[in-house]
Image (cartoon, rainbow, N blue to C red):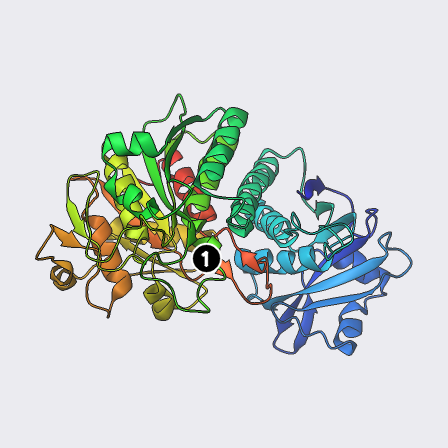
Amino acid sequence: MTALTLSTSSAAALRADAVVVGLAKGPKGPRLAPGAEAVDAAFDGRLTATLETLGASGAEGEATKLPAPAGVKAAVVLAVGLGDAPEDGEGYDPEALRKAAGVAGRALAGSKKAAFALPIAGAADIEAIAVGALLGAYSFTAYQSQNGSAGKGSLGEVAVVGAKPRDKEHKAAAERAVAVAEEVNRARDLVNMPSNDLDPKAFAAQVQAAGKEFGLKVEVLDEKALAKGGYGGILGVGRGSATPPRLVRVAYKHPKATRTLAFVGKGITYDSGGISLKPAGHNETMKCDMSGAAAVFGAVVAAAKLGLAVNVTGWLALAENMPGGNATRPGDVLRMYSGKTVEVLNTDAEGRLVLADALARASEESPDAIVDVATLTGAMVLALGDGRFGIMANDDDFRTAVHATALAQGEDSWPMPLPKQLRKTFDSPTADIANMGVRPGGGLIAGLFLKEFVGEGITWAHLDIAGPAFNEGGPFGYTPKGGTGSAVRTLVGLARRTAEGDLL
């Protein structure tokens, strides 16, 4: 991954391939953001005018390159748009810094080193710039040959100018940025990996390898253990595949921790819809249906890397949903781990089935809170669009806290209700409940279904990341095409707040 360093050198004096400066939209035209003073001086104070002549306005997502003049050791100056300039006395929004740094990280692919001279008012800005740059520099080229379309490769090093490597707060901000960005990018890699290489068994093996590397306790339940334990939901979904399912428990413990969080992730490594086969045009990206499990995995590893004073247990419900000869049929009844029976009306509503077993099992350990993450429903995409995830919870205050944490980390989200009147719509005349209710409010019905399997008295939230988990369009900000690593930053933020006594 791209390296990160902190530098007290002048932006003009630092040896690098490029120096990155910020340009904002002011009321009277574009204006340079703080951090660019030394570079502007090398342009005899005419950098803003030069950029404006080239068509730069400071708009978000903008990137303008120009040759560096004498007095700047970098060969290229890259101006990135920060959007609207803040009011006098106010700092730049961290998300604006993240996005601008991400644009630069991507624009400088193939460069060995870039100096980021963006505005810094404190450690939070350093973390935002570093996270944005490291995420923006991401590329997935594992399946591209050297003679193929592998491209220029990622930016080699990000040097944050104006940050002090010996300052404890600055150093801690950089460490957080690296840990979080590495795990978001790990999640992206997993989501982007084709299903023929990432089946449930292979996914579980990756968790086991990381467990050894970072001192995590990993337990893998294979199909025999799942059958013995009565995990009817996970087994029912995985029955049609030649590759049997897995339930993975990965745990990080801190000796001084007083709180425990359980994260539960949907890990459908490929979703054909099962017997309720998806229509043509809806299968091509279904390798991404394990994004929730990838986010949970990355968040647990990040908590371990950061040494957070909280216990974090991840549960990865892994299966392939295929229409094989042994596949679960519409009308079949599954006996879940909790003992409840579920009539399967639609085999493409499989994520809630594997999550139900994992939620019930996670509840047995009585964590202080459970958060599940899943690419669960197309209904949530229709409700909120591609760019944000929905949050449901059995506690309004906790839902508000999760929403605030997500926004603080730059992950767009929206609190959603769990209307009691919708509960009766998935009553079943055959079993305890059905896996489908009425069509309107489908994302909310999925949340109500999951709530049935959360242990009594346990605080719980559900994140439906179906929209932002996989970007089918072009890259923007620090978001690449393909897997995005959605929800990793939110989960790490929740773990950090819990460790600091600010949550639960």
Quadrant holding the N terminus: top right
Query: Residue at left 25%, top 29%?
Result: 228
Q: Which x, y percent locates residue 47?
A: 79, 68
Q: State the residue in front, 407 or 469.
A: 469
Q: Which x, y percent locates residue 66?
A: 82, 66
**One can see residue 264 in this view:** yes
**One can see residue 91 in this view:** no
Q: State the residue in front, 269 or 489.
A: 269
Query: Residue at left 65%, top 47%?
Result: 142
Local crowd size for mark 1, using a 10 Å CA cut-off: few (<14), some (14–19), many (≥20):
some
Q: Which x, y percent locates residue 364?
A: 23, 32
Which residue in the protein does label 1 denote?
Answer: 286
Q: Which x, y percent locates residue 99?
A: 59, 59
**58 sits to left or right of 127:** right
Q: State the residue in front, 459 or 187.
A: 187
* Element type where label 1 sits in the image: helix
Query: Residue at left 76%, top 58%?
Result: 37
472 in relation to 197, above or below? below
Residue placed furthest toward the front: 325
Quadrant holding the C terminus: top left
26 in relation to 219, above or below? below
| Amino acid identity at mark 1 | Met
180 in relation to 95, above or below? above
**105 sits to left or right of 443:** right
228 in relation to 127, above or below? above
Residue placed furthest toward the top: 255
Query: Residue at left 28%, top 55%?
Result: 392
Q: Count the marks.
A: 1
